[in-house]
Image: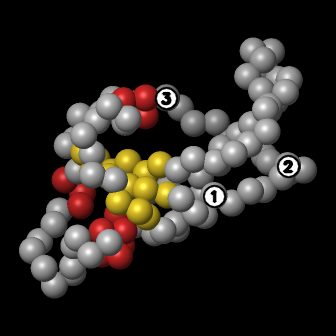
Amino acid sequence: MPGRLHVAEGHDHHPLEAGWWCAAAPPGAIADPAALDAAPLAWTPAAVPGTAAAALADAGVWRLDGPERRFDADDWWFRTTFDAPPAEGDGDGDGNGDGGWWLCLDGVA
């Protein structure tokens, strides 16, 4: 799916800095976010910005001087929840009535 660039000038900015969790899954095991709740994943609290390695280290389940862990060998999922008022109208002007909310992630690797 190709990305689209949108300028967000004049919009409210609400950083989502708390309440993040991360979990590893075998590559390709989870097709989309809708499948996360049914997947038997071990969710770990995660600080953002941050990494999966930092989250596991902070939780005491992995150490840099411990057994080797190939973090790139897994798919990593990060999730959080947040409250937002209902969106109204057609936020991007494309006529499909998709509301007025954009979730922008800065620096996702």
From this viewpoint, which residue is outermost toward the bottom? 65
Distance between mark 2 and mark 3 Cα atoms: 25 Å
Q: Select label 1 or label 3 by which is in front.
A: 1
From this viewpoint, which residue is outermost toward the top? 96
Mark 3 neighbour density, 10 Å: few (under 14) some (14–19) many (20 or more):
few
Quadrant (top left/top right/bottom left/bottom right) for the C terminus: bottom left
Q: List the residue tagged with mark 3.
A: 1
Instruction: Determine whether the residue tagged by mark 1 lies in a helix, strand or loop.
Output: loop
106 to 100, vertically: above or below: below
87 to 54, vertically: above or below: above
Instruction: Determine whether the residue tagged by mark 2 lies in a helix, strand or loop.
Output: loop
From this viewpoint, which residue is outermost toward the right? 10
Q: List the residue tagged with mark 2.
A: 11
Q: Is residue 6 visible?
A: no
Q: Residue at x 86, y 23 (%)?
A: 89
Three-letter amino acid code at disc 3? Answer: Met
Instruction: Determine whether the residue tagged by mark 3 lies in a helix, strand or loop.
Output: loop
Give the colour scheme shown. secondary structure
Numbered circle sitting on residue 16: 1
Q: Is residue 63 visible?
A: yes
